Image (spheres, rainbow, N blue to C red):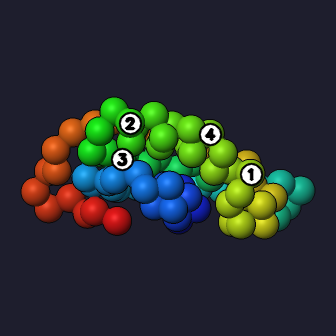
Amino acid sequence: MLTFISLAQSKGVQFVAYESTAEGLLENVDGKFLISEVSVAPNVVLKSDHDLEMARTIMAQVEKHCCISNSIKAKVKLAPQLRVGAAIPGTPNP
């Protein structure tokens, strides 16, 4: 998600809060364990409707620009939650 944050900040998108979780699927393929899938679920709160639309556009482009997803064999799935809102106390802001 560093790619998303970097692209969004370069376009002036204003974040209120950001959190992300990730899970990997470990499988035994031909007697070898490998991570076959990675699911990333960012939760992003943005300052305005304009920022929300920009974030959606950028999120659609993230995978093709991400050096990690371009470097691994595993399928990477994104499940973003994007919304406009106020900061929640204790929530990280990039």
Question: Would residue 25 be visible to someone looking at this image?
Answer: no
Q: Which mark is residue 64?
A: 1
User: Label 1 amino acid?
Assistant: Lys
Image position, residue 32 (x, y; %)? 82, 64
Q: Earlier in the sequence, mark 4 or mark 3?
A: 3
Within-10-Å neighbours for mark 1: few <14, some 14–19, many 20+: few
Q: Is residue 82 left or right of residue 5?
A: left
User: Label 4 amino acid?
Assistant: Ala
Mark 1 and mark 2 residues within 8 Å of each other at the beta carbon: no
Q: Residue at x 43, y 56 (%)?
A: 12
Query: The residue tagged with tag 4: helix, strand or loop?
Result: loop
Q: Which residue is mark 4?
A: 60
Marks 4/3: CA–CA distance: 14 Å
User: Label 2 amino acid?
Assistant: His
Q: Which mark is residue 50?
A: 2
Within-10-Å neighbours for mark 2: few <14, some 14–19, many 20+: few
